[in-house]
Amino acid sequence: MSSMPHPTTVATPLVIPGSRAVFWLVGTALIALAVYYFIGVDQGAISVFGNDTHIHEFVHDGRHFLGFPCH
């Protein structure tokens, strides 16, 4: 049997410029706030869409599963 050395790999960090990092951070925060609003805050009657309850009914069971009251 011949003894072959095992190849070693070195992880190289991913470097993102500061301007792109800020873009991704702000974008992710805005999407997270929108998701939080539609799942946790939108009540249908006080919706930003008026008296439309379609979004409320769409996420209704998920709201209860996550512990948000809605009645």
Image (cartoon, rainbow, N blue to C red):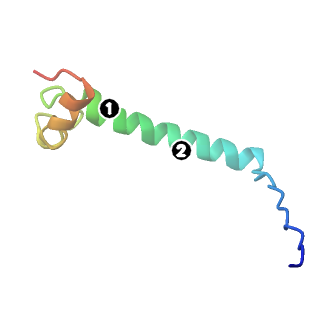
**Residue 61 placement, left or right of 48:** left
Q: Mark 1 points at which residue?
A: 37
Q: Residue 19: x percent and y percent?
A: 73, 46
Name the N-terminal-most of marks 1 and 2.
2
**Residue sitting at x 18%, y 20%:** 69
Q: Residues within 10 Å of mark 1 (few under 14, many from 20)?
A: few
Three-letter amino acid code at the position of disc 1:
Tyr
> Dot 2 lies on which element?
helix
**Residue sitting at x 90%, y 73%:** 3
Three-letter amino acid code at the position of disc 2:
Gly
Numbered-mark total: 2
Q: Which residue lies furthest to the bottom in this view?
A: 1
Alpha carbons under labels 1 and 2: distance apart: 15 Å
Q: Name the residue under label 2.
A: 27
Seen in the picture, residue 17 relative to 62 is either above or below; the reply is below
**Residue 20 placement, left or right of 41:** right
